[in-house]
Image: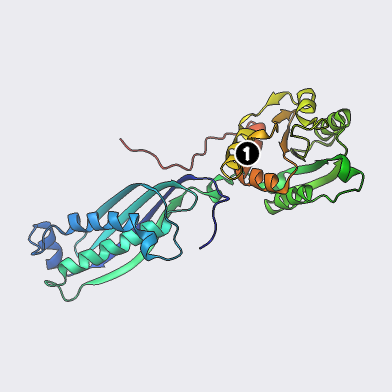
Amino acid sequence: MIDISHKDPTLRTAIARSEVFMDVATAEVIRNGKVPKGNVFEVAKATAIQAVKNTSTIIPYCHPISITGVTVDFNLHDDHVCIDVSATAIDRTGVEVEAMTGASIAALVVYDMLKMIDEGLSIGKVELVEKRGGKSDFHKVNPSRLKAAVLVLSDSIAAGKKKDLSGLMIRDRLEAEGMTVADYRIISDDQQGIIEQLCSYADNDGYQLVITTGGTGFGTRDYVPEAMSSVVEREVPGIPEAARAHGQDRTPFSMLSRARAGIRGGTLIVNLPGSRGGVSDSLDAVFPGLIHAFKMLRNEPHDHDPRPEVKD
């Protein structure tokens, strides 16, 4: 089973559809409530709900997830019935297979309850009609338009005593997200030097995103939060809050990070810890939501919401 522990739970929905084809007379028996085994749709509905909730017990590579809602709708035509199953969950993985399992089982129940009166029954295709939630629904900004810089803050790395790994990890992740990393730089933990470099990135180079690594702890040379006070014009507290919350589920030390995030002009500056684990956890926490920030910075409409509409 694939490890999805690095993901954060998000709202996920999926709708699947199945079809059962039958004789015209059989459809009329359903309409008149004359099926010998009872109410076809009520039994199929209850079974489909159970199937959605228990998908992981019969599909080996499906993760157990907490289903928060299931709806089952039937549309009876002259010679077939369409079954729509919608599944909802707030979890780390999608509910497509759960919805399709529910639709499949519902079709089998309909088949089982009608086979004694219709030897020509057949189950048609089972298909995914719609899915929402997850990473793809939040990538509504083209990352290739974004120019970024990675700034490594460390006395020992700047002096050549240690090799940088965290900064390279950030660079690789930004490039994997589709961004252009225009500058990768290592400087010492000098507060004034940090201020000058961050201001240069924002004021002279016009980078949309600057990510720093290191200097966010309790050490006597950890000046990044203090430097940020002199650089950013507007705080974005939700970014480090999300990173710390995500990390705290994985290590008890995440709460000790003093990382900050803020905006200077049109540049978003985000601090990450210096450790590889802290960087990895933080990047998982802030992407892909971080991409949406640049649409907001450009004053573009940002009313996209991947959640389904709630009907009265």
Secondary structure state at the residue bearing disc 1: helix
Residue at the disc numbered 1: 243
Position in image of residue 35 (x %, y %): 10, 63
Position in image of residue 66 (x %, y %): 40, 48
Q: How is the image coloured?
A: rainbow
| Residue projecting furthest to the bottom | 119
Q: Residue 51 vs residue 231: left or right?
A: left
**Position of 286 relative to 48 (above/below):** above
**Position of 141 relative to 196 (above/below):** below
Count of numbered badges drawn on the protein = 1
The residue carrying pointer 1 sits among few (fewer than 14), some (14 to 19) or many (20 or more) residues within 10 Å by Cα, namely many
Quadrant holding the C terminus? top left
Position in image of residue 169 (x %, y %): 74, 51
**Position of 34 relative to 286 (above/below):** below
Position in image of residue 121 (x %, y %): 21, 72
- Which image quadrant for residue 50? bottom left
Q: Amino acid at mark 1?
A: Ala
- Which image quadrant for residue 262? top right
Q: Residue 98 vs residue 136: left or right?
A: left
Q: Residue at x 84, y 29 (%)?
A: 195
Which of 235 and 31 lies nearest the eye of the viewer?
Answer: 235
Q: Residue at x 73, y 52 (%)?
A: 175
Q: Residue 21 vs residue 144: left or right?
A: left
